[in-house]
Amino acid sequence: MASSKKKRAVEDSMKAAGEELPDDGSATSEDDCTDESENEFMDQEVQVEFEARMPEDSDFNGIKTLLQQLFLKTSINLSEMTDLIISQNYVGSVIKEKECVKQLVSLVTTQCQEAAPELSGNLTEILHHDTVGLLLNERFINIPPQITVPAFQSLRSDMEKACRKNMPFTFSFFLMLCKTYRYKAKPKPGQPELFFSNPEEELISDMSDLSATWSVATERDGVSDGRWDMDDMEATRTLLLFQADKFGAIIDKLKAELAKT
């Protein structure tokens, strides 16, 4: 396509200069060849390799953008959280007690109390008396869910190495915040009540010890996932909490299930 546009630009300049254009037959033939070569690559599977590396200062804007699409208009200091993720690049993104963490704890406890009051007591008890790691699972659009498996495997390995060096990365629970959406009205029989933007997180939810969902429809400026703009759907966030010793089993489940897709 680019070569055709370039050729047309050359022809236009020749016309403007009063020069004679080449024979039409040859021009049509070249365009046809270009179209045929482009069509050869349509509907073909492309193998892409991803390189994993530690986050660094140049990743600040990208990481903050991913956090913004997760936390939307909440009062959490995402710049501080981004800096914290980058500063702890030796083991994924485990969060220590900073102001942004206090804001996160306030957010999830408040929302859980409203969305699932029967569970809020358990959540508050765990957050204040157990070691809880914030597990962030965000990626840009068109990155396949299969990348979650090696990412989680690498994170688990990093934490094990850190613990062997007596670093404080031994957790009792992991907390996740997931982008979800649901029907505004009661779903029809056979329809799921909740949809996960990242499909692998639905598998994780099946093994979670605690789950709570709340609406964020009023907090959105715009979301890349067009399904959230449907009249019968509303954007939500879902909190997942699971025991840390389940992490290995969760990775195994993701590996088995995502290999089928």
Image (cartoon, grey):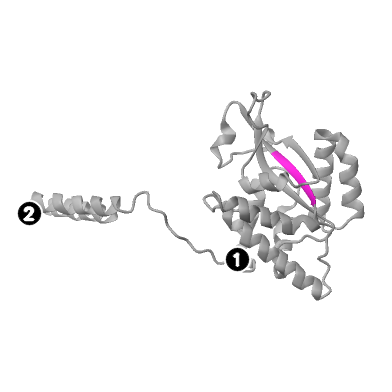
Q: Position of residue 83 (x, y in %)?
A: 71, 62
Which residue is located at x 58 percent, y 57 percent?
A: 147
Direction from residue 133 to residue 45 in the image, left or right: left
State whether the magenta stretch is mostly helix, strand or loop.
Answer: strand
Q: Position of residue 97 (x, y in %)?
A: 84, 59
Q: Regarding mark 2 in the picture, which secondary structure is present there?
A: loop
The amino acid type, in three-letter code, at marker 2 is Glu
Q: Using the image, tell me which numbered label, if any, was put on residue 58.
A: 1
Direction from residue 244 to residue 146 in the image, left or right: left
Crowding near the residue tagged with mark 2, few <14, some 14–19, many ≥20 C-alpha atoms within 10 Å: few
Q: Mark 1 or mark 2, which is nearer to you?
A: 1
Numbered range of the magenta stretch: 237-242
Question: Which sits in the foreground, 230 or 19?
Answer: 230
Question: Which sits in the foreground, 85 or 53?
Answer: 53
Q: Regarding mark 1 in the picture, which secondary structure is present there?
A: helix
The amino acid type, in three-letter code, at marker 1 is Ser
Which residue is located at x 85 percent, y 37 percent?
A: 113
Q: Using the image, tell me which numbered label, if any, was put on residue 20.
A: 2
Which residue is located at x 47 percent, y 61 percent?
A: 48
Direction from residue 109 to residue 185 in the image, left or right: left
Question: In which quadrant of the rendered view does residue 251 lie?
Answer: bottom right
| Residue 61 position (above or below residue 230) | below
